[in-house]
Amino acid sequence: MKKNLLTGILLVTSGIAFAQPSVRSYNKGVRQAKKENYSTAKRFFTEAIEEDPVFSSAYYNRALAKSNLKEYESAIADYTKAIELRPHFAIAYNNRGADRNEIKDYSGALQDYTKAIEQDTSYAKAYYNRGIVYFKLEQYDKAISDFTKAVKKNAFYTGAYYNRGIVYSTLEQYDKAIADFTKAIKQDSSYAKAYYNRGSTYLKLEEYEKAILDFTKASLIKPDYADANINRIIAEEKKRQAQHTSL
């Protein structure tokens, strides 16, 4: 799950640009993080914090580096410190929720996503992330509600359409699932999983030709997509059986 990096800072006083030691270290960390050198970035953010213990953005970005290194518990601690220093830090709540999700602390994740939404009611990603957790907890109505809110906040939130389609398919509301997978595909024509899941839904509805076309498209986009290749063969066989039965 991609998270946002806070960018560098330049302090300007009396018309002369200069950087305090903590800011110099912080900016070095940002540059390394942009290069995905997360271990080095973490070291520079640590230096920034040692030089300025109330540097909330440094805690946030160090947490982000730790998240990318899969050091989730330590990242959560840094997000917590960033929030203590900046109580309305919506993105820090969201990202702490994401790391709590990674360690399967779903209750904590839900609390954080809800807190992020309280800080910023237009935060589509927080609605989306909360919807993912609700889906994992099999609270399907709440998941649908959050994915719907996400697309209302951001009409081009392809993943929200796709995952709402997954929920609808789970609930056997196949027409709604197909509509959402189709929206996802219209927004991203290379979305192999959307083609695959729409094909799987057509297969359940015994619309074999449409299923074959979607499985084929998924395989063309991702040639090593084993499930798509297998399900295309299944759909082709079921189509032949249906044709034979109709004779």
Image (cartoon, helix red, strand yellow):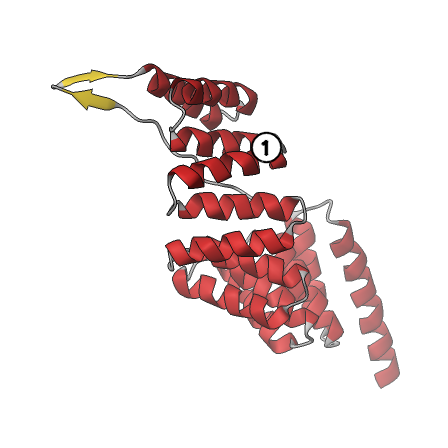
Residue 177 visible? The answer is: yes
Residue 79 rendering spot, x and y as whole percentages: 49, 38
Mark 1 Cα within 10 Å, few/some/many (few <14, many 20+)?
A: some
Residue 235 rendering spot, x and y as whole percentages: 79, 67
Q: Quadrant of residue 143?
A: bottom right
Residue 85 in the image: above or below residue 242: above
Residue 233 rendering spot, x and y as whole percentages: 81, 60
Image quarter hosting the N terminus: top right
- Closest to the observer, 177 or 148: 148
Residue 160 in the image: above or below residue 242: above
Indicate left or right for 181 with 238 as reference: left
- Closest to the observer, 106 or 167: 106
- Closest to the observer, 232 or 91: 91
Badge 1 is on which residue?
74
Q: Residue at x 82, y 78 (%)?
A: 243
Marks counted in the figure total: 1
Q: Residue at x 72, y 66 (%)?
A: 200
Indicate left or right for 4 with 24 as reference: right
